[in-house]
Image (cartoon, rainbow, N blue to C red):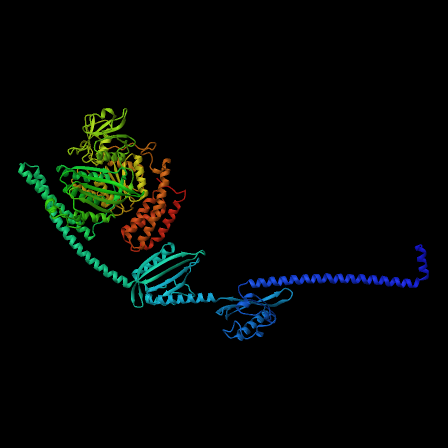
Amino acid sequence: MPITPALAWIDVALAPTAIAVYCLAALLAVSAGLALALLWRVHVERTRLARGRRQLAQQQAYAQALLDSLPFPVTVKDRDGAYLMLNAASRRDIRIDADAIGRTSLALPDHGPFEIEGAQPTRQRLHQSSLAVVEAGQGRQCEIAYTGGDGSHRAGLWWDCPVRVDDRGVVGSLGVLLDVTRFQQREQAARAAEQSLLEIAHHVPVLVFTVSLDAGGRRRLLFLAGDLRALFGLAPQDLVEAGDALRDWPFGDRIHPEDKSRVRRLLIRARRDASVHTLDFRAYGEEGLRWLHLVMAPRALPDGSVHWSGYFIDTTGINAHNEALRAARDAAERASKAKADFLATMSHEIRTPMNGVIGMLELLRHTRLDAEQQELLHAVEDSAGVLLQVLNDVLDFSKLEAGDLRLDDAPFDLRTLVDNVVGMMATHMHKKGLRIQVAVDAALAGQLVGDSVRIRQILLNLLNNAGKFTDSGSVSVGVRVIGDDGGSQRVRLSVADTGIGIAADKQVNLFTPFSQAESWTTRRYGGSGLGLAICRHLIQLMDGSIKLTSEPGAGTTVTVELRLPVERRDVERPPGLAGRHAIVRLAAPAVAAALADHLLALGLTVEQVPPAQPLRSGLAANLLFVDRDDETSPPLVAAQAIAVDADAAALGAPQVEGERIQLGANPLKWRSVARACEMGLAPLSPRPRSFHGPAPAAAEPARGQGRGRILVAEDHPVSQTLVRRQLELLGWPCDVVGDGHEAYEALRQGRYAMLMTDCQMPRMDGYELASSWRRHEAETGSFTRLPIVAMTASALDGEGRRCRDAGMDDYLDKPVQLHQLAEKIAAWMPEQVQPQRPSAGVPPVAADRLFDDPAMQALKADLLRTLRETGHADLLRLGQAIDDDDAQAAAQWLHRLLGALQLFCDDELLAEGRQWLEILQAGGEPDVLRRLPPYLDDLRQLLDRLDQPAASLPAG
């Protein structure tokens, strides 16, 4: 049926009912849709709510985990004080159960962690604290005692903090318990230790202190422990003003008047010097005057402040004991000195006529005597010589026992020393038919530092013993280097003989005074038995060792080992020897080896070819050393032949015999080898040039001594370097020593044409040096007068007259200018001696000032570097002299410093320094040392300015 007619039928037949049905159906459909939508919405909200609860639970679990990870108890309460959260440490350490959530501490049972003080009062105090924190909105803390989870009594710090929410304000409190038991225990232990220290310090005569100096210059007393009243008669409050500020001079009149200035200077020096400072002084304590020893050391802190920590200790008893010891020592020294004076007087009184006896015997020997008289005279001379030696030994031994013998170290040439000693003993040994062998290591330095006089005495004594107890055979002297650390050499000196020898059981007493191996040796050979004892004492003073090995009938060897500083490694030798070649063809291996060592030290290359070995064809050298009877070798080698003669008669200097040079080897002396080499490289002449020996008689100068070599005595390294360079530019060879004593010994050992000396030097100054040498010339009857020229920077009037009164011939003002130096040398140097050729490219007297030449800029830099190294050290020594109230030492160090500074600047400070120097030397103002420290600071600044590249040179 068609739809349209049906609808029409419905519409006609059922119109009212259908409408109602349709409306109801539509209404039901809408209601169902709304119900479905409502159900979906409910489902979505429930899902979101469940997710939120899960997230909240996770956050709560995370927050709880965070609280549980903390190692100390934490509680969270609401505004009313009820627990909201607890961490694991709360349940473990203060035993709050989980069921306490929602309850206050007052609602908990009366047992728990706070029973040590009573449960309820402590809980109530903590509850009230949390409520007060919520009300005030500010944190609070309090100390509590409680019982820990392990049952131990603990000390804690309870901290309550407010919990704020932005829109609600304070909603509760957070409580934290910190366990401070260990901190309290350590604090108690520290307090106990401090109290013990204070009690100990109070009962011991020691005062310990710490003082701080802040950036503003205020001094504060940080720590003080000890019996202040016993040491200074003061109470701690007497040392400070308001607060803990230290008074300017807290000790006031407690320090002895004679020591006040020393204490003040120490405190001033301590502010600028970071080293440890000590001082002994006197102070008035509770029981009178006491001796105190002060030790203090600074410590700089990062904030710029400085802490001085130190202590005072009462040394009155120690000083009294030391005074008693000093008195006993002085008494013993006086007794020993009396004995030494007696021995010295007796030795002098006996030796004076003894010298006359020996002198008269020598004159008697030159008169007409028959054979019997000659024999008797020889016996008397031997006896007189033995007696004089005994006197000398007794005097030396008395000095050693009294402690009066001191070593005098100075540079010396050990090769020359051995030459001289062996030469002194050679004649006596040759009379007995003995051979003398000498061997010196080629590695031995050119100059060592030691007491050459005492080393000579030791070697002379050993050689004398060797010659005395050897009737036939030989005596050998050896020098070997057995160690070298760069700054010093360990040298072994040995003297061996083929004499009677000594039994092993007798050797132990040889170094005992007045003792010999056998009583019959004294009767037969003589002697006092002091020689080896003196040698042992001297070697001990030098920190060396001595050893004796011997067998009866097999001879004796005495070995001495010494460690000596190296002054100069280069060996002084004639020019032109370095790099030359020598062939040694000798039958005696010992002589060949000793000669080879000498030649190597002289700078030659050496080839040893024994006589049993044939010479290869075409062999050439500069020098050929052969035995005296070898006539076949010289024609086969293109070289100057030098015949080595081991005969006892061959003792003089090398001589020319035909086409050969004769060299004596009994003994083989260093100077003789050097002379022979020098002669072999020059055209042969019957009058060879000398090396370290006297000039020929025809060439003896009328007004001076020597070969044109100048000796310079100057103590400052800067001035030493400068004058050495100036003399080199002028073509004059020179030796430089550091004081007058070294210069005097050098003059005695060598021949010089002129002496130039500084006037102010340690140990022996220039005035004393000149006077001593003039006395030496008069005593020795010298026919020549050594020219002496002073180098002085003194500003005192009459300096020239003072120099001449001391025996000097002229003087130069410092800084010494080159042309002035050349004029003085030309005026006083002997005309027969000419300078060596000056260095190439540098005119000898071209300018007034050494530094004007560009080639001298390197020297200027070296001198400035030396001045920086020595200047600050000199300032420290000058400050120490001021602290020691030693005006003489202060004048010496100030003179030394000014002498070096004037080479580089012409500052007005130098003029002021000369005024200070004049006052110090005149000694007219007692407080001059007290006024000097500010000037020292100015000199220190001047040295710092010289460190800059623009350091000025002196104005002409």
Q: Percent x, y for residue 815?
A: 32, 42
Quarter of the rendering occupied by the C terminus: top left
Q: Percent x, y for residue 574?
A: 26, 33
Q: How many numbered discs? A: 0
- Is 47 on the left or on the right of 517, as rendered? right
Q: Is residue 371 visible?
A: yes
Relative to 633, residue 437 above or below: below
- What residue sits 58% from the left and 62% below the top? 65
Quarter of the rendering occupied by the N terminus: bottom right
Q: Is residue 805 visible?
A: no
In this orientation, which residue lies closer to the viewer: 686 or 884?
686
Relative to 662, residue 873 above or below: below
Q: Percent x, y for residue 795?
A: 29, 46
Toward which corner of the image does residue 258 lie, by quadrant? bottom left
Q: Percent x, y for residue 609?
A: 25, 30
In this orientation, which residue lies closer to the viewer: 56 or 794?
56
Toward the front, the furthest residue is: 1
- Is 148 on the left or on the right of 244, as rendered? right
Toward which corner of the image does residue 430 lie, by quadrant? top left
Toward which corner of the image does residue 571 lie, by quadrant? top left
